Each structure stands twice: as C-alpha cells, then as structure tokens.
Amino acid sequence: MVCFSHFDLTSSSSPPFGEVDCIFCCNVLIYLQKPLQRRLLDRLYQVLATPGFLVLGEVETPTDNLREKLTCLDSKAKIYKKSGEATGDRQARDDW
C-alpha cells in the first residue's frame, strides 16, 4: 500500500504517519542549513521501519551518526538501509 501525506519537515510536531518502509528525500537537504539537515535526518531515521530504505539526492549524504546506523546499498544512487534498531531508537521515536 502506498500512502501519501503532507508534513512540514521543519516543524517540531509529530509526523502524521507511523513507521515508513521507504523514504525518498531527494534534493531537499541541500536547501537547509546543517543543523536543520541533522535534525531532519534524525527524524527520518526515527520513523523509518526496520528494515527500511532511505533514498537521498545525488549530492546529499547522511550525517556521520546515521552512517553508523545505515547500510549503504548503492553509493551512486544514495540508497541506504536501516538494518537494525538500537535500543534507544524506539523510545526516541515515541518521544517525538
């Protein structure tokens, strides 16, 4: 099933969706300042299901913190997989 929903990525409110199997965030981060990029990528990681896929734009990269948590499936296409969930991730998502 595919579900589309509107959500302001820069807001601090909870997203209108639960765990997501695949997130396409292409050519969005390049328009944001570094602190907001980090915060947004952390939020996307938190709502990403396990296993789940994160697809970024050609010039975008995950933060150092997320690179440790994601497996790069295709560096040219910028496709990453969330293969495991650290113990604090579920709690962090619930606190969002």
Image: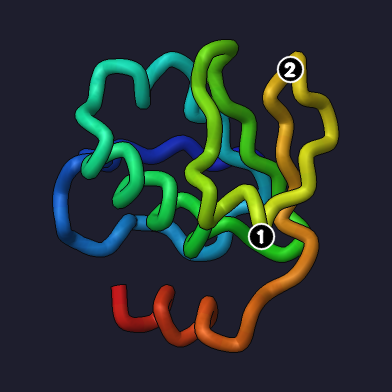
Amino acid bearing label 2: Ala
Q: Position of residue 34 (x, y in %)?
A: 27, 35
- Distance in Å between CA atoms under marks 1 and 2: 18 Å
Residue at image coords 46%, 50%: 44
Q: Position of residue 7 (x, y in %)?
A: 27, 41
Q: Is residue 60 above or below residue 71?
A: above
Give the left or right position of residue 69, taking residue 30 as reference. right
Residue sitting nearer the eye, 5 or 91 = 91
Q: Is residue 24 above or below residue 90?
A: above
Dot 1 falls on a residue whose secondary structure is: loop
Query: Which residue ends up furthest to the front in the rendered image?
Result: 64
Determine which of the numbered discs, if any, sits on residue 52 in the image: none
Determine which of the numbered discs, if any, sits on residue 77 in the image: 2
Residue sitting nearer the eye, 36 or 93 = 36
Q: How many residues crowd mark 1 within 10 Å: few (<14), some (14–19), many (20+)?
A: some
Q: Position of residue 21 (x, y in %)?
A: 67, 50
Residue at image coords 31%, 81%: 95
Residue at image coords 53%, 39%: 62
Amino acid bearing label 1: Lys
Give the left or right position of residue 41, taking residue 89 as reference. left
Residue sitting nearer the eye, 56 or 15 = 56
Instruction: Say whether disc 1 or disc 2 marks the residue closer to the N-terminus.
Output: 1
Q: How many residues crowd mark 2 within 10 Å: few (<14), some (14–19), many (20+)?
A: few
Residue at image coords 76%, 69%: 84
Q: Position of residue 55 (x, y in %)?
A: 63, 30
Residue sitting nearer the eye, 27 or 72 = 72
Dot 2 falls on a residue whose secondary structure is: loop
Q: For the C terminus, give its image quadrant.
A: bottom left
Q: Is residue 30 above or below residue 88?
A: above
**Residue for badge 1:** 69
